[in-house]
């Protein structure tokens, strides 16, 4: 009952129409201001004993209260690619301009036994389209939701229970975190867009300064509804996707229908997940082992670790393995070997399949840091799979507007966008250089990711410039190179995000 | 009567002997004992919380940082609270593994200790010191610093945990607190000098001097000066969970 109430309280609205959202947004905005206002602004000068008590209680609470409030506005100007996954921008409806202004408030209350977090968000989004079904249209929306919230209770100083919506991240890797079975995108490529959180119940037992054990239960999807394959390689993933409603597809009846939906990977609904994580921290080294499983899915074993080689150099690795795979693979159609269908062909396999990332960082005396990472994605497509995958996508794109068959084409493209692979192919290299606080004003980062298998690559520059102590101007770019049907040019040729933020 | 006088004299003599012996023992405290006492004035307790204001001038540019630090030995959790552009950034050091997190980055990133905090301040400077255990002390001739007689030690790192390879350390004979240090590289090159002030008292039952200010001067560019002002010092037992990286995201 409590969980249901909390879900209702914090749940992101499914309907994001502007008709009622402004009122809700105003309520949250007022709440933010009330929480942020200094106590004297609320109670005035306390002069009676009773008022003083209330005032003291409030100031006592306020001593344990922390708030970070930020206003951020940015404009994303993307150039959608002409790839077969998004024919004429009809499937993803990527706008030509995406302007947003958002209030991000992070509140926390740290008491002796309890720690509370509440992070409401209010935003206004304006979009304009040049291509696709919404060509020459504009839309304005307001939205309000709770990005993260958390109740943490210290049963003892070293036994801690918590429940809430969190962007639960771990691991040392920059490109992606293979050891995290819950959240695919680690958000490292774009510091300005928030990775949606999911609902977790966790218990942490800190055994001693070196060892701790966590149990993690993923109870609900929360705000994390992004596609499986695309969010890692597309940091500006925006648009109003015209995905088919797979729950209403006329494919078979009863059990046959359910089996078909399952084997074709059309059911992307949430599955609760469970994990046990053991962490060790020793002198200049650390590692973690994570065992996890999701309901109706297989168990997964992952882990990460790192060592400090010198005061300048760190080395680390992350991995995750499972028997078989939930991913969709292109399989030749019987009697039509040139034709393929995407299905969970390795669902029943007992072959260990997984992803391993190794990396290292080196920091110069001036603080400039270089990062190099290599990824082996055993779950990804080999050359033959990739050829079939792109051919299937192309065929589906060609049939997209054909009556009736077009619906099937949409279904295939929906599958192609939700292959359940974090990265499509097998071998990747990532190099990054960054330096913060150059002359106290400038943060710079440049990331280059190379798909060794298909030769496509992605360049991401991130520039943050401090104008005084409160204002920051920023730019996050994305420039994708490679053939038109390659992984990094799947959705965007390039895009630029430019904006400004004010920290109160 | 004579016997009583003799007994009185024996008592006085005994008392004198006791006082002399005690003074002699205090005088002859081993370098390790002296370092232990000096460490205590710089936070080597079961745990200490303090607010640090760092004021640095480097190449004529002034930088400021406010941090709230929970430290236990070399381990610490530091939260930057001001200026606004760094507000909410966190640094966690556990057994010489360091993680950095800033709002927006979404997860703690392991960083090397070569990353600068600000100005001439190293990460080790916001944690407590444990020179007594991590360095071997060579006794040098005593010196006077600002009119205060000092023990002088050349400290050479004997554990990998030590932040610096070699330190020349001046400890006040009267107050048993470190008042000056010179830090050297492995090759024996001086790279920074620090002086310390102890205007705080800590431990209500048995008040003892506690660090209030550290001044760091760059050896190559003496105009580059960094001041660390330690405020609101509070001795407190800090639980292991304070340094658990799993809790860093929402703390």
Image: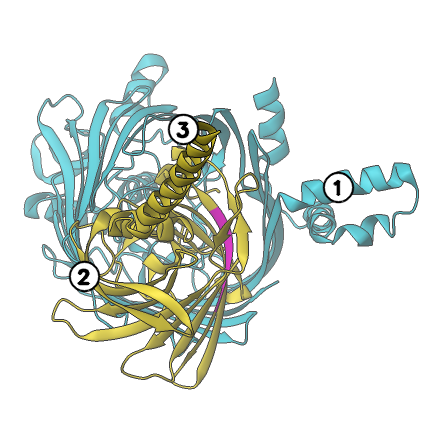
Q: Magenta stretch: residue B174 in it?
A: no
How busy is the neighbourhood of tag 1: few (under 14 within 10 Å), some, or many (20 plus)? few
* Chain letter of the residue beneath label 3 in the structure image: A
Task: Write down the colour of chain A.
Answer: cyan
Name the residue beneath numbered marker 1. Answer: A58
Residue under disc 2 on the same chain as residue under disc 3: no
Write down the region rendered in magenta: B49-54
Q: Nearer the viewer, mark 2 or mark 3?
A: 2
The image quarter in which residue A127 lies: bottom right
Q: Position of residue A502 (x, y in %)?
A: 58, 66
Give the image location of residue A402, x and y in percent.
33, 47
Asked if residue B181 can be seen in this view, the reply is: yes
Point out the tag, 3 or 1, that comes first from the N-terminus.
1
- Seen at 89% across and 36% down, the residue is A50
What residue does disc 2 label?
B165
Check if mark 3's residue and mark 1's residue have beta carbons within 8 Å.
no
Left/right placement of residue B184 relative to residue A21 reads left
A30 lies above or below B240: below
Q: What's the distance in space between the residues labelled 2 and 1, CA to CA?
A: 49 Å
- The residue nearer to you, when weighing A469 against B152, is B152
Residue at 27% of width from left, 82% of height from top?
B220
* Secondary structure mainly formed by the magenta segment: strand
Residue tagged 3: A270
Q: Of discs 2 and 1, which sits in the foreground?
A: 2
Q: Report if residue B52 lies within the magenta region.
A: yes
Badge 3 density bin: few <14, some 14–19, many ≥20, Cα 10 Å: some
Q: Chain of mark 2?
A: B
Instruction: Determine whether A108 is above or below B125 in the image.
Output: above
The 10 Å Cα crowd at callout 2, few under 14, some 14 to 19, many 20 or more, is some
Q: What secondary structure is marked by label 3?
A: loop
Q: Which chain is yellow?
A: B
Q: CA distance from mark 3 to mark 1?
A: 41 Å
């Amino acid at each position: 009952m409590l969980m249901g109430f909390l879900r209702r309280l914090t749940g992101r609205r499914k309907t994001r129409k502007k008709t009622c959202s402004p009122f809700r947004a105003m309520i949250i905005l007022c709440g933010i201001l009330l929480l942020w206002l200094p106590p004297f602004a609320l109670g005035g000068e306390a002069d009676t004993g009773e008022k003083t008590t209330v005032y003291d209680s409030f100031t006592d609470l306020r001593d344990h209260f922390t708030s970070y409030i930020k206003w951020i506005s940015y404009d994303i100007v993307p150039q959608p690619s002409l790839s077969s996954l998004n024919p004429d921008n009809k499937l993803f409806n990527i706008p030509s301009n995406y302007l947003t202004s958002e209030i991000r408030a992070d509140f926390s209350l740290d008491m002796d036994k309890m720690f509370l977090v509440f992070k409401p968000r209010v935003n206004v989004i304006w979009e304009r389209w040049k291509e696709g079904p919404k060509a020459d249209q504009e839309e304005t929306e307001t939205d309000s939701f709770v990005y993260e919230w958390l109740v943490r209770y210290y049963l003892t100083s070293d036994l801690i229970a918590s429940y809430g919506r969190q962007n639960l991240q771990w691991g040392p890797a920059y490109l992606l975190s293979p050891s995290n079975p819950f959240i695919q995108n680690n958000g490292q490529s774009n510091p300005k867009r928030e990775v949606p959180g999911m609902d977790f119940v966790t218990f942490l037992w800190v055994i001693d300064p070196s060892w701790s054990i966590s149990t993690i239960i993923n109870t609900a999807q929360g705000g994390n509804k992004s596609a499986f394959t695309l969010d890692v390689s597309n940091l500006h993933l925006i648009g109003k996707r015209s995905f088919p409603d797979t729950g209403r597809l006329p494919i078979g009846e009863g059990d046959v229908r359910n089996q078909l939906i399952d084997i074709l990977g059309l059911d992307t609904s949430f599955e609760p997940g469970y994990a046990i994580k053991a962490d060790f921290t020793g002198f200049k080294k650390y590692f973690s082992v994570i065992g996890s499983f999701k309901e109706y899915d297989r168990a997964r074993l992952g882990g990460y670790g790192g060592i400090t080689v010198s005061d300048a150099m760190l080395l680390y690795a992350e991995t995750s393995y499972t028997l078989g795979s939930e991913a969709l693979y292109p399989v030749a159609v019987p009697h039509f070997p040139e034709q393929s269908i995407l299905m969970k062909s390795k669902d029943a396999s007992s072959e260990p399949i997984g992803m391993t990332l190794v990396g290292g960082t080196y920091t110069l005396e001036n603080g400039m840091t270089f990062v190099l990472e290599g990824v082996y994605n055993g779950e990804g497509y080999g050359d033959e799979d990739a050829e079939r995958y792109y051919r299937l996508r192309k065929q589906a794109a060609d049939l997209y507007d054909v009556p009736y068959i077009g619906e099937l084409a949409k279904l295939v493209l929906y599958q192609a966008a939700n292959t359940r692979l974090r990265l499509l192919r097998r071998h990747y290299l990532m190099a990054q250089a960054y330096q913060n606080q150059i002359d106290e004003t400038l943060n710079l980062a440049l990331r280059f990711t190379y798909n060794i298998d298909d030769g496509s690559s992605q360049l991401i520059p991130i520039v943050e410039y401090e104008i005084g102590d409160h204002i920051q101007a920023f730019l996050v770019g994305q420039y994708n190179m490679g053939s038109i049907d390659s992984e990094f040019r799947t959705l965007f040729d390039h895009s630029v995000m430019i904006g400004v933020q004010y920290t109160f | 009567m004579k016997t009583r006088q003799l007994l009185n004299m024996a008592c006085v003599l005994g008392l004198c002997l006791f006082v002399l012996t005690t003074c002699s023992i205090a005088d002859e405290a081993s370098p390790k004992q002296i370092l232990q006492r000096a460490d205590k004035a710089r936070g080597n307790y079961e745990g200490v919380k303090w607010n640090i204001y760092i004021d640095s001038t480097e190449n004529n540019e002034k930088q400021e940082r406010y941090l709230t630090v929970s430290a236990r030995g070399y381990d610490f959790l530091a939260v930057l609270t001001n200026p606004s552009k760094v507000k909410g950034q966190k640094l966690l050091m556990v057994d010489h593994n360091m993680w950095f997190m800033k709002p927006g980055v979404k997860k703690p990133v392991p960083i090397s200790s070569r990353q600068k905090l600000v100005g001439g301040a190293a990460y080790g400077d916001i944690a407590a010191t444990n020179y007594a255990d991590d360095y071997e002390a060579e006794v040098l001739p005593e010196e006077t610093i600002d009119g205060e007689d000092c023990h002088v030690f050349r400290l050479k790192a004997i554990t990998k945990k030590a932040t610096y390879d070699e330190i020349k350390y001046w400890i006040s004979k009267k107050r048993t607190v470190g008042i000056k240090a010179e830090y050297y590289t492995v090759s024996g090159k001086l790279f920074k000098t620090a002086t310390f002030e102890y205007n705080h008292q800590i431990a209500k039952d048995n008040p003892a001097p506690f660090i209030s200010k550290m001044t760091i001067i760059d050896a190559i560019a003496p105009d580059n000066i960094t001041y660390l002002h330690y405020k609101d010092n509070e001795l407190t037992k800090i639980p292991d969970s304070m340094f658990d990286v799993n809790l860093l995201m929402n703390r």
